[in-house]
Image: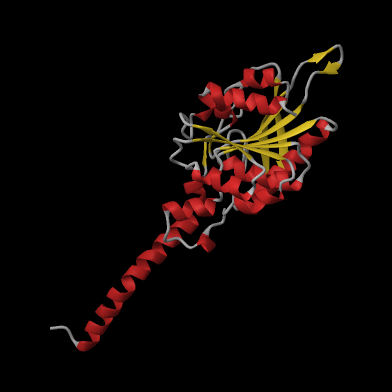
């Protein structure tokens, strides 16, 4: 037979057990956020990018060195034939080798393309530690490449994870066009969908596109697939409601990872680039 003291201890444990399980789960989310959000694929230092018009470049940031690809339009009779720069911020998996899949499209666009790998992605060194660091890295990369394009068009392009980074950048620097492909309102909102029991304060990467988008002065165009189950099109609809001047282009046949394969998407993207 249990003593009254042991019974009280057992009863207290049973009362506290749900809280202890919740606290342990929240602690796991806190400590493993980078593993849950970022899926980098490293590249060997010897990995070669063979296109003659695409150079590898490096951006020095505190504690790391970021790798990027820079496609440039040709020079004819000593004159560069470029309309400007597209500064491309990719999604949360892979590296520039997996995202740089349609170079001919960018050549036809008439724009140069600068595509950055975040810390730990591709040939980039270091590790992502928090949102402030990630945003600062993006600013530093922009500050390195933008002076080359004074007097030309500046386009900031963000896809999936990169859409939140691109929106932030567009609030900090002059730009002509912000292109958001499969964007989210915030990582915090997505976390609440998948982990509703996790307090927002636990997240080190809230990435509030919804709070920053109203401060963007440039034209904003949103591309989103209606079959996207990872970031449902409702996120894009909310962003357009927040920024009524934004153009929302819907693609009924597109999901999350295949939108770039649709001719309708590439045609719409080209039209927006040529509209400047």
Residue 86 picture location, percent across and down: 70, 31
Say if 211 sits above or below 142 in the image. below
Residue 3 in sight from this viewpoint: yes
Residue 74 picture location, percent across and down: 77, 16
Location of the C terminus by quadrant is top right
Q: Residue at x 18, y 87 (%)?
A: 3
Residue 47 picture location, percent across and down: 59, 24
Outermost residue, bottom side: 4
Location of the N terminus by quadrant is bottom left
Count of numbered circles in the view: 0
Residue 232 picture location, percent across and down: 47, 42
What colour scheme does the image use? secondary structure
Q: Quadrant of residue 12?
A: bottom left
Residue sitting nearer the eye, 25 or 268: 268
Say if 49 sits above or below 195 in the image. above
Horizontally, residue 191 falls left or right of residue 143, namely left
Residue 127 in sight from this viewpoint: no
Outermost residue, left side: 1
Q: Residue at x 60, y 40 (%)?
A: 162
Q: Residue at x 24, y 87 (%)?
A: 5
Residue sitting nearer the eye, 127 or 187: 187
Horizontally, residue 15 falls left or right of residue 50, namely left
Outermost residue, top side: 77
Say if 238 sits above or below 123 in the image. below
């Amino acid at each position: 037979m249990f003593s009254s003291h042991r019974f009280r201890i057992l009863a207290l444990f049973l009362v506290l057990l749900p809280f202890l399980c919740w606290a342990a789960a929240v602690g796991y989310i806190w400590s493993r956020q980078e593993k849950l959000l970022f899926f980098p694929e490293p590249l060997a230092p010897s990995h070669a990018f063979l296109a003659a018009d695409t150079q590898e470049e490096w951006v020095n940031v505190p504690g790391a060195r970021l790798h990027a690809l820079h496609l440039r339009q040709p020079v004819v009779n000593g004159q560069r034939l470029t309309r400007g720069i597209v500064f491309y911020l990719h999604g949360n998996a892979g590296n520039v080798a997996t995202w740089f899949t349609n170079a001919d499209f960018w050549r036809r666009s008439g724009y140069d393309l600068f595509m950055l790998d975040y810390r730990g992605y591709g040939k980039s060194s270091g590790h992502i530690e928090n949102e402030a660091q990630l945003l600062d890295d993006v600013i530093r990369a922009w500050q390195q490449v933008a002076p080359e394009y004074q007097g030309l068009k500046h386009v900031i392009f963000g896809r999936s994870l990169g859409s939140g980074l691109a929106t932030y950048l567009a609030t900090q620097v002059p730009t002509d066009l912000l292109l958001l492909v499969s964007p989210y309102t915030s990582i915090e909102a997505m976390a609440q969908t998948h982990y509703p029991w996790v307090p927002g304060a636990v997240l080190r990467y809230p990435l509030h596109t919804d709070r920053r988008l109203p401060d963007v002065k440039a034209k904003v165009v949103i591309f989103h697939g209606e079959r996207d189950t990872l970031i449902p099109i409702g996120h894009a609809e909310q962003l357009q409601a927040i920024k009524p001047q934004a153009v929302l282009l819907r693609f009924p046949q597109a999901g999350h990872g295949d939108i770039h394969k649709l001719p309708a998407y590439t045609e719409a993207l080209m039209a927006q680039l040529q509209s400047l």
